[in-house]
Amino acid sequence: MSALSANLQYSVEATFEQMVHFHNEHRVNDFKKFLVHFFNEIMQMDVLFLNIKNFDRDDLNSLYVDSQQLSSAFDKLHQSYYDKHYLEDGELKSLLKSTEKQLHKLANISHKYYTKRLPIEKAPDYLKSGLVQYSQEVLNKKLS
Amino acid sequence: MLYNRGDVIEISFNIPGEGMKNHPAIIISNEEVYNIDGIYLCVMVTHSGMSSYFAFDLEAEMFANPNNMPEGKAKAHLIAYVEDKHIIKNANTKRCKMKKIYVDRLVDFIASTALSEDEI
C-alpha cells in the first residue's frame, strides 16, 4: 500500500469507482459531497509529502504509480464532465478544478522524486540550438 | 490565428551532416499571446521510451484525434517561441489536438518540473 492509499478512506480504485458510480447515476449532489470529502483528504497529504525525501525506492515507486493512476483517472472523469455539465454548474466546476489541481500537484511531486533516481536523458544538441534559434528570431523581431 | 492552444504542430530542425528533421510540438500559449504578438509558445515532443525528470507521458485519451497523435513524450524544459511561418503545413500531426484539461495538466507539469525552485 502506498502512502497515498494509506491516507485515503478508500483505496485508489474504490475512490475512482465511487466517483464513476455517482457520475453514471447522475447523482450530482452525492458526487459533490464525495468530491468535498475527497478534496479534504488529499489536501491533508501536503503534510505527508514533507517526508517524501525519506521514502525508500519501493515507497516512492508505489506512491508514483498510485498518484499517476489517480490523477489520470480523475482527468478522465473531469473530461467527461467538462463536455456535459462544466459550464452549467459553478460549484461542480470549482470542485473539479480544485481537486484536479491538487491531484496534479501530488502526481508532479511524486514524479519529481521518483525520476530523480533514474538515468538522465539529455536533449540532442541540434534540438537545443534549434529551439534557441526559433526563440531568438522571434524575440529579436519583437524587441527591436 | 491559424493554430490554437493544444494543437499539435511540427517544426523543422537542422541536424549537422544529416539535413532537416521535423519534430512535433504542442502549443501551450493562449489566444491573447497570438493576438498581441502573433507568436505561439510550444513544448517539444521527442521520441523516447524512457521515464525521466522532464518527460510528460502522452496517451491516446489526451487527444481529440488520437490517430495522428505524436509519438514520444513532451519535454517540459524544451520550450520555444514560434511564428506561423515556422510551422510545417500539411504535417503528419495536422488536425491532432490535445484536449484542454490535458493541456492544463501539461502546463502544471512544466511549472512543477521546469519552472519552480520548490522541491515540494
Image (spheres, coloured by chain):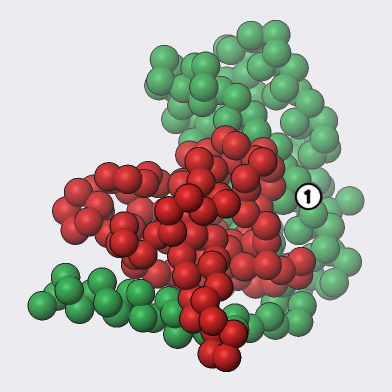
Chain colours: A green, B red
Q: Chain of mark 1?
A: A
Residue at the far bottom in the pictured view: B17
From the viewer's perspective, is A4 left or right of A129? Answer: right
User: Residue B74 appears at what percent x and percent y?
Assistant: 59, 62
- Vertical position of residue A52 compared to residue A17: above or below: below
From the viewer's perspective, is A57 left or right of A90? Answer: right
- Vertical position of residue A129 compared to residue B23: above or below: below
Q: Is residue A47 visible?
A: no
Q: Nearer the viewer, residue B9 or A77?
A: B9
From the viewer's perspective, is B79 left or right of B68? Answer: left
- Hey, what amino acid is under mark 1? Asp
SS for dot 1: helix
Residue at (60% x, 37% y) in the render: B65
Residue at (70% x, 24% y) in the render: A19
Q: Is residue A64 visible?
A: yes
User: Residue B58 appears at what percent x and percent y?
Assistant: 66, 52
Residue at (57% x, 35% y) in the render: B64
- Vertical position of residue A90 compared to residue A52: above or below: above
Q: Which residue is mark 1?
A: A66
From the viewer's perspective, is B104 left or right of A135? Answer: right
User: Residue B15 appears at what percent x and percent y?
Assistant: 54, 84
Which of the image's four quarters has the C terminus of chain A? bottom left
